[in-house]
Image (tube, rainbow, N blue to C red):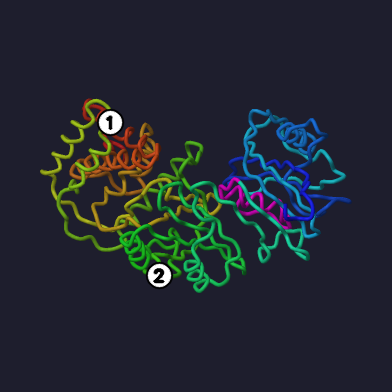
Amino acid sequence: MTGSRRHTEPLDVHLIAVRDGTAGTEVLLSRRAGDVYATGCWHLPSGHLDGPWEDMVTALVRETHEETGVAVDPADVRAAVTVHHRSPAGGARLGVFFEVRRWHGTPQIMEPQVCDAMDWFALDRLPEPIVAYCRAGLDAYRAGARMGVHFQEPGDPIAYDPAVDRLLLVPDPGAHDATPADAVRAFAEQAVGRIVRWTDVSWARQDSRVWRAHGAEGGTWYVKVHQNERFHRREVAALRGWVAGLGEAAPRLVAADGVLRAVVLTAVGGRSLHGAAFPPEQQRKVFHRVGRLAAAIHTSAPPLPGGGAPPVRKLERHLDGARTHLAAGDEEFVRATVESAAGLPALPEVPTHGDFQPRNLRWDEHADALYVLDFERSEYGPAVRDFVRLADAWHGRPDLLAAVLNGYGRTFTPAEEAQLAVLSVLDAVSGISYGAAHGDPELVERGHRTLARLRAARQHPDHPTVTRGAAH
């Protein structure tokens, strides 16, 4: 033991009650009032353990009811993040933050002597002033971290100040670094000025590296490092070229570095359509906008002459990786579908996104706007290329398919229908092969759904195909 004394930090419990709101994920906060620490600042409902026999979960349930009036079942409490905190005055403590998504009752002020306001706030638009300790826990939670250190220095404000953000995330085993490499950070700061906070927002997939960068003057950007030179070259070319024709529907390229394979992009609003839930009428509106956006992409530059049949050269390699995960009859169906590509006519080639699917689309209900991200797979190709991964989103929902095609302005030609089926089969097998090799069950499941859907359409001629009869 090298220190002068052992640490004897108290333990706090913090409630991260979250719900899906109109502005995205929202969190419940209360504002401190009266003769208490950090009066006037927003904070999560929180408290200490009551005596030596109370455990953390019991304490959270009790404090939640005492402060907000709602009842939480201990079975609905989820571990979120743990933060080792030190206040500007030097006192240290351990904060355990818990996520809760289900409860009984409506949150309300139960202790008016120490709380004068309570409300829901979007996680990406937290109110000010907010206790820096609380903000550290929420930032770590948003970053997907399981542990963080937030040791403030003497003279630091109690309220959160981005200029003195002391949060350090402790990486999980095998996790990405919380911040980019020094060279990437220097490149980004040369482009936009000093960055005071980095949030890793990479997808949980190999080689996905994206950070949200918060500037000292209040701006927000995204910094991305491409996994290979080809992806970097494609995205930069698209952003410097035809993407500009999409207007506010896409981010803008601020800076690019070919050696680092890095880009700095402006931020767009909204929330990802991946996993988003909307009422049926709202869904149809969103999907109509998706069709309009697809049309804008495909008409953003003049078309080129057709390039021939769909690419099938990698089929055998993908089948080798997917074979043990295919259902009976899948391989025969895949080969028969691909063989049919030999007689397909060439289709005109237009600018395509290449990965046009819900996770790369964002909807901002307040702005009534749809945005598209990630152009690293963009290239000239048949227009139907951009409907391969989108088709899974409307499966079983002919109203959503109709909304997309009405927004797009037309149905597909028979030649496009046939090529879309071939491209979908190739994408499904590729996804199963890659997902099985890299531990990505979502890709594997999507591939299985695609093959099952296309086989059903082939076995039952009266079964609706991808687009037949969907638009007017």
For residue 420, the mark is none
**Residue 130 located within the stretch drawn in magenta:** yes
Q: Which residue is mark 1?
A: 326
Q: Identity of the amino acid at label 2?
A: Asp
Camera-nearest residue between 94 and 125: 94
> Residue visible at 15% across and 43% down?
341
Q: Is residue 296 left or right of residue 23?
A: left
Report the residue at 22% width, 56% height from top: 349
Q: Residue 159 location, x and y as percent? A: 74, 59
Residue interval drawn in magenta? 123-146
Residue on which the image places disc 2 = 257
Give above or below for 34 relative to 230. Answer: above
Residue 135 seen in the figure: yes
Q: The residue under label 1 is which amino acid type?
A: Leu
Location of residue 212 with respect to 68 vertically, above or below: below
- Count all numbered tags in the image, as a single digit: 2
